[in-house]
Amino acid sequence: MKVEHDDHLLAADLATRAGMLLLEQRELISEDDFADLGTIGDQQSHQFLMDSLAEFRPEDAVLSEEGTAHSVHPNRSESNRVWIIDPVDGTREYGDPPRTDWAVHVALVIHRVPVVGAVALPALNLTLSTSIANHQSETNLTSVPDSPRLVISRSRPPNEAEMVCNALSGEMIEMGSAGAKAMSVVRGEADIYLHSGGQYEWDNCAPAAVALSHGLHVSRLDGSSLSYNNLDPWLPDLLICHPDLAETVLELLNQSGRP
């Protein structure tokens, strides 16, 4: 099954609208209930996305962080077209207003390849996607700075990220969700997003699709391509970076002797 132009527009529209719902929920809830905000937002966004995909793409399967049920293809292995969604990427950050480093992911995988994707950054009023129309308002790739910027989690960064940063005399930038980190590279705010602690497919499928469509390098840490809609949705590692840095970063990782 080939991808349709409307798939790109649908992904961007759904991610954006889910983000608007999440922002509305953030405004409605009282400060005393912030501890429940992540759970409530996750459920509402998940239901909206599932209902919308059932309406507009009833023949496709869906894999969501919050569940895998779908009206036509409850067994997604039977479908070549699978939407992979994360209703709230960065639940902790979303539940900590006014933080902006959280996202909504909507992606379409065809024959295991991430060809359609949208990552909404609702608190920034921004959605980045594989849509051509979306690209027209976005910044093109710029040259790599003398000190490359690596985006990392607020908690302890991966050893590989520290090694690459030191080898390149780089700078580390702390940020929340995976989608926010990946989009910081797409937006030119960072140059490398290197993750070795493992993620699920919904954590990076939409970011990978968007990054690829914007000309960035996207791969596993051994340089191999990412594959989605696997029976086990766990993905061990990820590299998204400026294409001019890819060869150097992969060589450093190879020389480090990581398994």
Image (cartoon, rainbow, N blue to C red):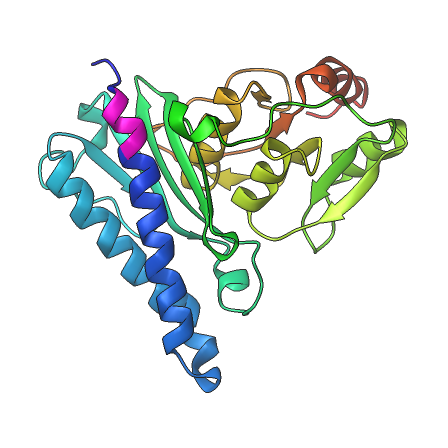
Relative to residue 255, is residue 39 depicted above or below? Answer: below
> Is residue 103 in view?
yes
Nearer to us in this view, 171 or 139:
139
**Nearer to me, 238 or 128:** 128
198 falls in the magenta region = no
Q: Is residue 30 left or right of residue 67?
A: right
State the quadrant of the N terminus.
Answer: top left
Which one is nearer the viewer's eye here, 22 or 80? 22
Residue 27 horizontal/vertical position (percent) = 41, 73
Q: Name the outermost residue toward the bottom.
A: 32
The majority secondary structure of the magenta stretch comes to helix
Place residue 180 in its image quadrant: top right
Q: Which residues are magenta?
A: 5-9
User: Would you say 38 lies left or right of 17 here?
Assistant: right
Residue 64 visible in the snapshot? no
Q: Residue at x 25, y 48 (%)?
A: 49
> On screen, 19 above or below 206?
below
